[in-house]
Image (spheres, rainbow, N blue to C red):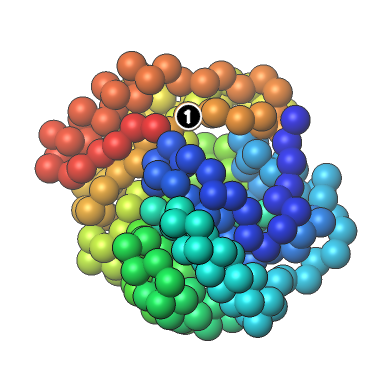
């Protein structure tokens, strides 16, 4: 069963990719707000969650994060990473850069060993303030699930205009200082067969990865409930085989 995050700060949880992760949710607490409507999203469909559409304020995020870090420091159990994710796309927040400024300052004060990570679908890279903020965090983890617009439309269901070509150009502007994150799955949704693990898909995706030249690639498959119930998880062994092909390009690749 898909579910929303009911608080600004959640966890810490043991992340498959990041270690002990303290989550930060900039999105509404009772509704999902995202520029994608991914068929695999653990928060469910956008239309299922059409409640209050207000972002959590910069001030409330700062206060909640500071209180949590103070408590965790007192307990001697600080997080490995502070991760922006939550109920949708975090970079949609109107003051995302300011929130990142606050978070970096709090991290430096209370948990200097912790990394700051952002999980993003890369749809807000046309905003220079978002790009500036992403260049300052330790891990800007940006989504690219397919090299083909048709697959992205079926799998990620972008809200508004989106093209792979435009997204790739924006990812290239980071000069390699990004982590590309890719969900691999197969199945059927709304009568459409979806499989981004075919040889044609993988070959085209690898070409784009080589063009973007990120410092790392993260591959993963379904681990939680999904709004589309007819999706199939890709095996760890298959993920490892694709990861090896990324490694052959000279790019670090991890599998979760």
Left or right, residue 154 beside residue 108: right
Between residues 148 and 16, which one lies in front from this camera angle? 16
Q: Residue at x 73, y 47 (%)?
A: 4
User: Residue 110, position in %: x, y?
Assistant: 43, 72
Question: In the displayed structure, would residue 185 be above or below residue 235?
Answer: below
On the question of residue 135 being in view, the answer is yes
Where is residue 137? Give x, y as percent. Answer: 37, 68
180 or 68: which is nearer to us?
Answer: 68
Query: Image point 63% across, 54% down: which residue?
Result: 10
Image quadrant for the C terminus? top left
Q: Is residue 169 above or below residue 191?
A: below
Local secondary structure at mark 1: loop
Residue at 23% across, 53% down: 215
Q: How far from the left and from the top, in percent, is residue 218? A: 35, 41
- Lateral position of residue 109 relative to residue 7, left or right: left
Disc 1 marks which residue? 221
User: Total of numbered circles in the picture?
Assistant: 1
Residue 35 makes an appearance in the image: no
> Residue 89: image x %, image y %?
60, 59
Q: Quadrant of the N terminus?
A: top right
Quadrant hosting residue 226 = top right
Position of residue 165 in the picture relative to residue 11 (left or right):
left
In the displayed orientation, state which residue is furthest to the right: 51
Q: Badge 1 local density, few (<14 within 10 Å), some, or many (20+)? A: some
Seen at 61% across and 22% down, the residue is 231
């Amino acid at each position: 069963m898909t579910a929303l995050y009911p608080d600004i700060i959640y966890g810490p949880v043991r992340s498959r990719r990041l270690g002990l992760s303290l989550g930060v949710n900039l999105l509404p607490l009772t509704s999902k707000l995202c520029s994608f409507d991914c068929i695999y999203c653990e928060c469910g469909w956008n239309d299922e969650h059409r409640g209050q559409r207000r972002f959590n304020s910069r001030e409330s995020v700062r206060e909640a994060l500071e209180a949590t870090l103070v408590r965790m420091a007192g307990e001697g159990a600080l997080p490995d990473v502070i991760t922006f994710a939550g109920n949708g796309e975090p970079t949609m927040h109107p003051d995302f850069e300011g929130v990142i400024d606050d978070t970096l300052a709090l991290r430096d004060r209370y948990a200097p060993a912790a990394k700051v990570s952002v999980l993003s679908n890369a749809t807000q890279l046309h905003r220079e303030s978002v790009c500036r903020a992403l260049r300052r965090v330790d891990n800007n983890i940006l989504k690219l699930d397919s090299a083909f617009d048709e697959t992205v439309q079926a799998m990620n269901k972008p809200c508004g205009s989106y093209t792979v070509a435009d997204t790739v150009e924006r990812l290239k502007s980071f000069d390699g200082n990004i982590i590309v994150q890719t969900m691999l799955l197969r199945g059927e949704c709304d009568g459409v067969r979806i499989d981004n693990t075919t040889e044609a898909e993988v070959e085209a995706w690898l070409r784009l990865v080589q063009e973007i030249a990120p410092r790392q690639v993260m591959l993963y498959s379904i681990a939680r409930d999904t709004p589309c119930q007819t999706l199939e998880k890709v095996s760890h062994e298959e993920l490892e085989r694709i990861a090896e092909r990324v490694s052959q390009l000279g790019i670090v690749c991890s599998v979760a």
